[in-house]
Image (cartoon, rainbow, N blue to C red):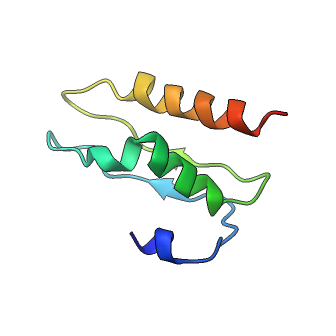
Amino acid sequence: MTLERQQPQRFDMPAVDAFFSDSIPVHLITLEAFELYFRHIKPDGLLGVHISNQYLNLEPVVAAAARRIASAKTP
């Protein structure tokens, strides 16, 4: 919510790391969340997402969001 209220920060590599427990904050891996993250990252920056989880395979979810963001940026 804080990022929504701020001007773009131009981060080099922010990290999202909140998925280890069995209760994950799903709102952090929505397409809208990824769009918000990338609004605050430099054009040549990276987003780090720690997706290890004992109960859920988050890789396909994060990969799908990354593909959508990348395709939206490609002319």
* Residue found at the very far left of the displayed protein: 22
**In the rendered picture of this protein, how many numbered marks are placed on residues?**
0
**From the viewer's perspective, is residue 65 above or below residue 18?**
above
Quick one: 18 or 28, which is closer to the camera? 28
Q: Residue at x 31, y 52 (%)?
A: 18
Quick one: 27 or 60, which is closer to the camera? 27
Q: In the image, 36: left or right of 57?
A: right
Task: List x then y, in percent, for residue 69.
Answer: 63, 37
Quarter placement of the N terminus: bottom left
Task: List x then y, in percent, for residue 75.
Answer: 85, 33
Q: Residue at x 66, y 49 (%)?
A: 46
Q: Residue at x 79, y 51 (%)?
A: 44
Task: List x then y, in percent, for residue 61.
Answer: 41, 28
Q: Residue at x 15, y 44 (%)?
A: 23
Q: Residue 10 occupies which quadrant of the picture?
A: bottom right
* Residue found at the very far right of the displayed protein: 75
**From the viewer's perspective, is residue 2 above or below residue 53?**
below
Quick one: 72 or 23, which is closer to the camera? 72
Task: List x then y, in percent, for residue 66.
Answer: 58, 34
Q: In the image, 31: left or right of 55?
A: right
